[in-house]
Amino acid sequence: MAKTTTARPFPLPPLIAAGVAVAFTIIVSAVASITGFGKSVETSAPIASSQLYFIDRDDGGVGVLTAPDRREVDVLAPGSNNFLRATLRGLVRQRKREDLGAEIPFRLTAWADGRLTLEDPATGRTVDLGAFGETNAAVFGKLLTDAVRTEHAGLPSPSSTAASGPLQGHATP
């Protein structure tokens, strides 16, 4: 003998509750996206910043130039500064993906809380250089110190002298 079962409808209140939860999540996400609610805001003030171009040279080196006057800050020898090269390669790859050129300089900034960041204003991407260790950040810290000197003092690059100045104690070698 075959058993017959009656189909019981799924209770309506849990379905309504699930629908309300999904709708609420979508609305909150849309409002947060439109208003910018929840985005992190820099809480530290910049203590030094420089806009820089990084130019490949024929000899395999990398020229570091200030913007907008394109004064030479430093020349990185071929095969040296692998972290700096890899960081820039990643940022440049993003520019190429978005069909952006090299006209807009990168922004290197030291913050009062000790952070050092490299920002690509063309793509909006920012790299917190301290996340890769003090030694790696120090390479960029020295460049920033040299760039600030070059920009504000109008002097030739001090790359052969010891680092001091606005970044003393902030990721300089």
Image (cartoon, helix red, strand yellow):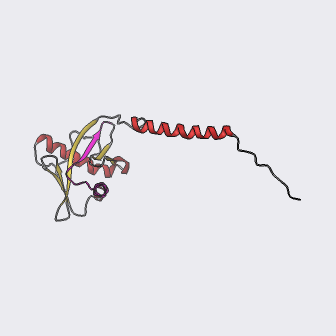
Q: Position of residue 116 (x, y in %)?
A: 31, 44
Q: Position of residue 165 (x, y in %)?
A: 20, 40
Residue 141 falls inside the magenta stretch: no
The answer, for residue 111, to whether it is visible in the render is yes
The residue shown at (32%, 52%) is 136
Q: Position of residue 51 (x, y in %)?
A: 21, 45
Report whether 71 appears left or right of 130: left
82 and 165: which is toward the camera: 82
Q: Is residue 45 left or right of residue 159?
A: right
Of residues 35 and 4, which is closer to you in this image? 4
Quarter of the image where one finds residue 62:
bottom left
**Image quarter for residue 170?**
top left
Q: Which quarter shows the N terminus?
A: bottom right
Visible residue check, residue 173: no
Q: Please state which of residues 30 and 147 is positioned toward the viewer in this rendering.
A: 30
| Along the viewing direction, whichever of 82 and 172 lies nearer the viewer | 82
